[in-house]
Image (cartoon, coloured by chain):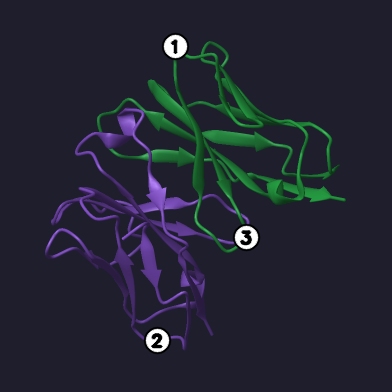
Chain colours: A green, B purple
């Protein structure tokens, strides 16, 4: 079973609307959680990184939340733009002292005019 | 360079052919990672280097996969006798810190990947 589950798998939203992407994880012990944006044909680009003590972090129109107790995170996109069309990948780092990251499969977002 | 550079951008190989994928990390970055990303999936860890030392290769799917970073900068991922299931995007990423870089708030910078198609 994947240690990081994301939902919805894909969604289509109208330009200007908001949307929220969900990430549930089972990685333990937990070190930090990252959200990446991956445009088609490109590598992932970091949006936010949060440790267990952080509940929310913003990067422009992107706001990530983290509940380390329930092992859930969300990424909220405000006033979506066409350029927000991408895959959003939730990535969790365990506190193992190694360099393994657990990747979700991504939320595929399509913004239409 | 300004970012992580990977080449070639696309590679088409006949089954059984050997391929070599190159990664130029950001200058000065100590840590380098290789990932395999199948269509519609998240990246899967392949191997990790700290400078020239390959500290973790447990993600390599078979002994047909080999990676090196002889001078601690450029890295090459080699796949021998390619098979159709090797078709994927191969991503390289680098980070400035040493172990354990991912247990901190250190960013991981990805290249655009090499899309390998094995026919």
- Residue B89: percent from left, percent from top: 49, 65
Q: Which secondary structure lies at badge 2? A: loop
B9 lies above or below A36: below
Residue at point 78%, 34% (across, down): A79
Q: Which mark is residue B16?
A: 2
- Residue A81: percent from left, percent from top: 76, 44
Where the C terminus of chain B falls, by quadrant?
bottom right
Left or right of A47 on screen, residue B25:
left
Residue at which label 3 appears: A40
Residue at point 58%, 14% (across, down): A70
Residue at which label 1 appears: A53
- Residue B61: percent from left, percent from top: 36, 61
Where the N terminus of chain B falls, by quadrant?
bottom left
Residue at point 32%, 65% (across, down): B23
Front disc: 2 or 3: 3
- Badge 1 density bin: few <14, some 14–19, many ≥20, Cα 10 Å: few
Left or right of B43 on screen, residue B94:
left
- Badge 2 density bin: few <14, some 14–19, many ≥20, Cα 10 Å: some
């Amino acid at each position: 079973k994947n240690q990081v589950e994301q939902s919805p798998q894909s969604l289509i939203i109208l330009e200007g609307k908001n949307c929220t992407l969900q990430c549930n994880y089972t990685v333990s012990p937990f070190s930090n959680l990252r959200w990446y944006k991956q445009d088609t044909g490109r590598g992932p680009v970091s949006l936010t990184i949060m440790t267990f003590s952080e509940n929310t972090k913003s990067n422009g129109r992107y706001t990530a939340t983290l509940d380390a107790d329930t092992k859930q995170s969300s990424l909220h996109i405000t006033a979506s733009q066409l350029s927000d069309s991408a895959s959003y990948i939730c990535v969790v780092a365990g506190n193992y002292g190694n360099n393994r990251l657990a990747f979700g499969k991504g939320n595929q977002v399509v913004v239409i005019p | 360079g300004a970012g992580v550079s990977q080449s070639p951008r696309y590679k088409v190989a006949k089954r059984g052919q050997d391929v070599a994928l190159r990664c130029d990390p950001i200058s000065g970055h100590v840590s380098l990672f290789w990932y395999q990303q199948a269509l519609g999936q998240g990246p899967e860890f392949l191997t990790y280097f700290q400078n020239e030392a390959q500290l973790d290769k447990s993600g390599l799917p078979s002994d047909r996969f080999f990676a090196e970073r002889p001078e601690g900068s450029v890295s090459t991922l080699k796949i021998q006798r390619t098979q159709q299931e090797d078709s994927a995007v191969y991503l390289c990423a680098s980070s400035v810190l040493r172990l354990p870089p991912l247990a901190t708030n250190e960013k991981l910078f990805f290249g655009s990947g090499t899309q390998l198609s094995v026919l």
